[in-house]
Amino acid sequence: MAMTDLNATHDPGRRSFVESANQPDTDFPIQNLPFGIFRRGQDDARGGVAIGDQVLDLRALCTSGLLSEAAAEAACAASGPRLNDLLALGNRVASALRARLVELLAIASPHRAALSPMLVPAADIMMQLPTEVGNFTDFLTSSYHSTRLRPDSTLAPNFMSMPIAYHSRASSVRLCGEVRRPNVQQRIGDEVTFGPTLEMDYELELGAFVGPGNGLGEPLPLDVAREHVFGLCLLNDWSVRDVQRWENTPLGPFLAKSLSTTISPWVVTEEALRPFRVAAFHRGHEAPPLLPYLSSAVDQAQGGFDIRLEALLRSPAMRDGGEPGVPITDTNFRHMYWTFAQMFTHHMSNGCNLQPGDLLGSGTVSGPTPESRACLAELTARGTKPLTLPNGEIRSWLLDGDEVVFRGRASRPGFVSIGFGECRATVAPAVTWPT
Amino acid sequence: MAMTDLNATHDPGRRSFVESANQPDTDFPIQNLPFGIFRRGQDDARGGVAIGDQVLDLRALCTSGLLSEAAAEAACAASGPRLNDLLALGNRVASALRARLVELLAIASPHRAALSPMLVPAADIMMQLPTEVGNFTDFLTSSYHSTRLRPDSTLAPNFMSMPIAYHSRASSVRLCGEVRRPNVQQRIGDEVTFGPTLEMDYELELGAFVGPGNGLGEPLPLDVAREHVFGLCLLNDWSVRDVQRWENTPLGPFLAKSLSTTISPWVVTEEALRPFRVAAFHRGHEAPPLLPYLSSAVDQAQGGFDIRLEALLRSPAMRDGGEPGVPITDTNFRHMYWTFAQMFTHHMSNGCNLQPGDLLGSGTVSGPTPESRACLAELTARGTKPLTLPNGEIRSWLLDGDEVVFRGRASRPGFVSIGFGECRATVAPAVTWPT
């Protein structure tokens, strides 16, 4: 299966002439090379590739003469203000650029002088949304999350038969920054009121960006659909629990989710993540057999990812004291019951068309252990058992000024560890209702 | 309240030099003037206005010198392949164009000779989607529909407190044409299988297009939000009942809805529909008081619309016999419990941003009477009491080759009746699952 193969770009011995990319703690060694959109000063927004603490300008590279054929096609498709055109070309075209980039950026690269003017310090740029997100779908694929949040602590009857999902809101997907506490309906006893939510929560997820996608009425089988997973980012599916309880029946979450979704700016490609592929979740003897359209030997053997994911909470008091945040979730993406390939093919199975740049959220990445609970609803048993932070502060739910930071990192002996950068946002106070 | 006022464009005595627009059965008299996107031959797609059996080319009008200021701005914004830019300008700008169009198209218009080359026979064109639908949200706002489809035949506890909705799928919104029967998971007894749905249904709805919309975190109060309802179309929210039952808990409808949504091509403006405004649904004594953010005197007095809506079913046998379809639903939009203004402000209430060209579906427009049931699930009591059609054919659910046609028309004594055109699509057989 070509898509899961390793190649020369994964060689752990490879180093870059960008010194910061060779530090063991960098998220962006030469083995990663994630794509994003950046803007410097008054320049047009354009695609870039992160390498250490620098960003390689793909618009400049496109016209440099240093690329040929597919690699040039990829860089030029990433020269505009969104990556959709690059994603539409498919993983193999992006792979050609990656193969060339590891040569160009290598420590002994003969092109170092030509490339240096195309490298921009990450500290000097603003990141923008990587794609125009035409549609955003959010899944529920951790059995641990699902069980902890069900009233009777059992899995929904359909959970083991299909990756459950709902359409979410694309217009409010944003990069790191701030998220405003929403005004919502709450029911307390028999009384329904409207005002700032009292139960604001984060959900730690990974997002997957769609490559070329499929035509309407033209589903793709699992082993083809998996090639349409272009890359991943960190995703905070902000969740508002009081209105979620009140609105959820009969049609699922609506205002509980559409307030905003925060993603990290760098798209870590499927190819970069291949060394960290693992088997799909072990379904166990009690699970029903997989329906054929959700089953393939390759996906069962390699459909998962071993990616450590952490959430940190930084209160205003910590920020005022110059302290970093405190870890509140430490989990791993290998706990997910369904693979992204299964999510993709299930989503297409009724003929629904996925389009380049569409975003699919994995669902909250909760695992079996207490520290792997990946939202406050789980960590505080729906607010009934508040967290006590190391500085003595108490949290049932997020308060105004709280900053939530996600980090993700994939490691495996014999390979260079790669990271996702940060997904960071601060809760801003609710607006006064306009009149 | 200026937005609900009538003006000279509503004058029932007005006639057009386009003779077909003066026929009593036309959907498109000079009092209507809906917007759409059309393409003729190899020409670029562009905005047009329907008048009788003709379409006025807004790109040609934009550069004609016949318009000034806001009217020119509106026509030029509608010169491209989507109406989003027009909608972003707001209803008052579109209204300026409408005011000028009734002069230009009047029976005694001095500009008849100049306009005639800009009029294209509707028979010679292909219509396209009116907007790039960034996001599509579907509501549930008929108490009759909701009650009939609940297992215990009662309203959900939240129904009278908020317009219930779910995010639906924007990428699969299409104009009239065909809709392919989806392959889906079905649970029969304890067995879960995957194959062509056995329970394909239509839902007769109206869609509302969003005008300028709101910024993220910046909700608009009800009486401002109502000015962001640009116009309406017919909407068929194709629904797949077997998978809907199976997937709906815990996160609501997903593949049951995303297969495709069919809309009619013409956007009938809020201004054209003003003569047919009626009071909001009478909530009765048992309803909880409206929360202030969902309540205004104007919306309660004039937030509804009196629009008759019909669904016809045309089987392959009828088509082969040259017969038109048979009416199976005859309902009215005044039965809806919530107004579009309430849907808009509720949608924005948590800070979610609505964008120009976004689409909101009203939910199935079912009324209290048997003939006003607006989907087969209601008409056949979930398939248990099949319909017998006049030609003896039986339907529990839609069969391959069945064509579903929606029509809508607003009438009131003393005013010229206006229509929506047709929303028409045929069920195509499921694809064989690819391998």
Image: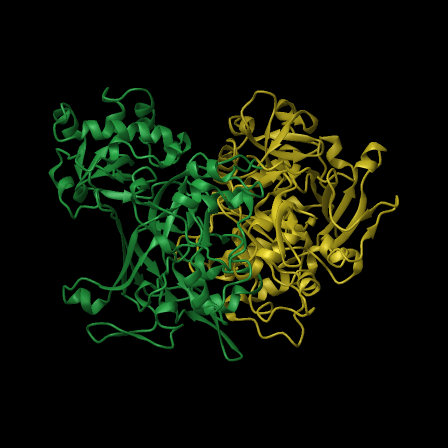
Chain colours: A yellow, B green
Residue at point 54%, 28% (across, down): A59
| Residue A331 picture quarter | bottom right
The quadrant the N terminus of chain A occupies is bottom right
Residue at point 60%, 67% (across, down): A159
Q: Position of residue B269 (x, y in %)?
A: 32, 39
Which residue lies most toward the front here? B285
Q: Position of residue A60 (x, y in %)?
A: 55, 26
Closer-to-camera residue (A205/B389): B389
Closer-to-camera residue (B325/A368): B325
Closer-to-camera residue (A106/B247): B247
The total number of labels drawn is 0
Q: Is residue B99 left or right of residue B230?
A: left
Residue B243 visible: yes
Q: Position of residue B383 (x, y in %)?
A: 38, 74
| Residue B45 picture quarter | top left
Residue A93 visible: no
Residue at point 32%, 20% (across, down): B69
B308 above or below A148? above
A299 above or below B348? below
A295 above or below A118? below
Which residue lies most toward the right here? A391
The quadrant the C terminus of chain A occupies is top right
Q: Position of residue A212 (x, y in %)?
A: 47, 47
Q: Is residue A322 left or right of residue A33?
A: right
